[in-house]
Image (spheres, rainbow, N blue to C red):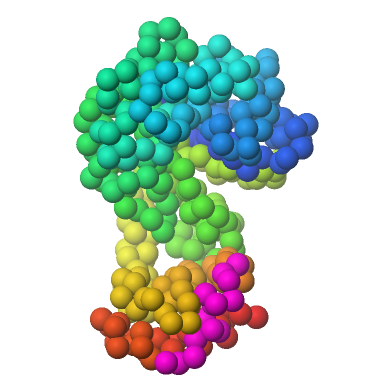
Amino acid sequence: MQYREFGTTGAKVSRLGFGAMRLPDDEKQAITILRRAMDLGVNYLDTAPGYMEGKSEKFLGKALRGYRERVYLATKNPIEDASGDNWLRRLEASLKRLDVDYIDFYHMWSINWQLYQEKIDVPHGPLWAAQKALDQGLIRHLSFSFHDKPENMIKIIDTGHFSSVLCQYNLLDRANEESIAYAKAKGLGVAIMGPVGGGRLSAASQEIAKLIRGGAKSTPEAALRFVLSNPNVDIALSGMGSLQMVEENVQVASRRDQLSGEEREHIIQMTESNRKLLDLYCTGCNYCLPCPRGVNIPRNFELMNYHRIWGLTEYAKEYYQGLGIEEQAQSCRSCHLCEGKCPQKLPIAQKLQETHQALGK
């Protein structure tokens, strides 16, 4: 296993982190998987009170018995209101479920700049409570997980209150790339969620595997290597639900040579070329909506792009089937109202027909 200094926190963390949101529902099996990962050198474990309806924290707490001082534990606190007292009560509940005395990296969960201003940095609010928890040793470092515009991540970093950030970043979504670099430059630890695109990049795709010169054994390997090759990324979290996933991901994270700068630039150029093809098909501007039949035109075309451009056909088919019948391309009756609103003048009805032919079987 390879390790990195986690910002200026003093922690030396494994490049692969364990995201404990997709554990098996069986407690014994879940503990076996978690301990196998720790035995193989994974020393950063991330959970949240809402994962698996609270079971994730409980399972992780039991798995940590005998391992606690060897690992860094991360969990989260949802900002449900502006009360610091309520924030502390939620912290105490997590400590109880985890059966630990302290949490290493405690996250303000899924925050944005508006939430920070209105409910976090307020008198006797969560930020006040977090400082109290730090002073009492209940948490070692205050962190935040982020779902907002990249420029707002920079605003939150500049408050100076946080030691690390957890955010989305992957081969298909590089929107946070510059703000990740900013976080690193400011001394924050950088952990990444969704390195395989929320499951999109777990599906087989020869096109994506071939982006790495010499190839990759699988799409997830290519995706994980891309994230870990970013010099500003310390940890890539993987939601591992089986021993096989643990073994495979540890093997990838144990490589000293993820990607050279030249290989990484080649991948970026290829993905940017593909994005231009995506825009020729549909930019996702949503001007075509609403459809009088209820067809979710942009979502259909997004799934078609996963199939047509990225080769993620099984993923695209699965999620197409998951759409309601009225949202699927097959519900189009070629009224052509959408085509009059499309800035690109796409033959939408024809392309919806192609989408159903490709994904509806």
Q: Quick check: 338 left or right of 239?
A: left
Q: In the image, residue 88 lies at what x, y percent?
A: 45, 18
**The N terminus is located in which quarter?**
top right
Q: Quick check: 7 left or right of 13?
A: left
**The C terminus is located in which quarter?**
bottom right
Instruction: Name which quarter of the figure residue 338 lies in.
Output: bottom left
Q: Quick check: 335 left or right of 90?
A: left
Q: Quick check: 178 left or right of 227?
A: left
Q: Is residue 201 visible?
A: yes
> How many marks do you count on the picture?
0
Q: Is residue 229 visible?
A: no
Q: Nearer the viewer, residue 186 or 91?
A: 91
Q: Does the magenta stretch include residue 248?
A: no
Residue at the location (55% across, 11% down)?
A: 101
Q: Is residue 323 magenta?
A: yes
Please, is residue 121 above or below residue 325 in the view? above
Q: In the image, residue 359 lies at what x, y percent?
A: 58, 78
Instruction: Name which quarter of the figure residue 7 lies in.
Output: top left
Residue at the location (38% across, 8% down)?
A: 135
Please, is residue 38 above or below residue 301 in the view? above
Q: In the image, residue 234 lies at what x, y percent?
A: 41, 34
Q: In the image, residue 209 lies at what x, y percent?
A: 52, 62
Q: Which of 348 and 38 is in front in this view?
A: 348
Residue at the location (61% across, 80% down)?
A: 360
For this orientation, the residue located farthest to the top is 136
- Magenta part of the protein: which range? 322-335
Residue at the location (32% across, 65% down)?
A: 272
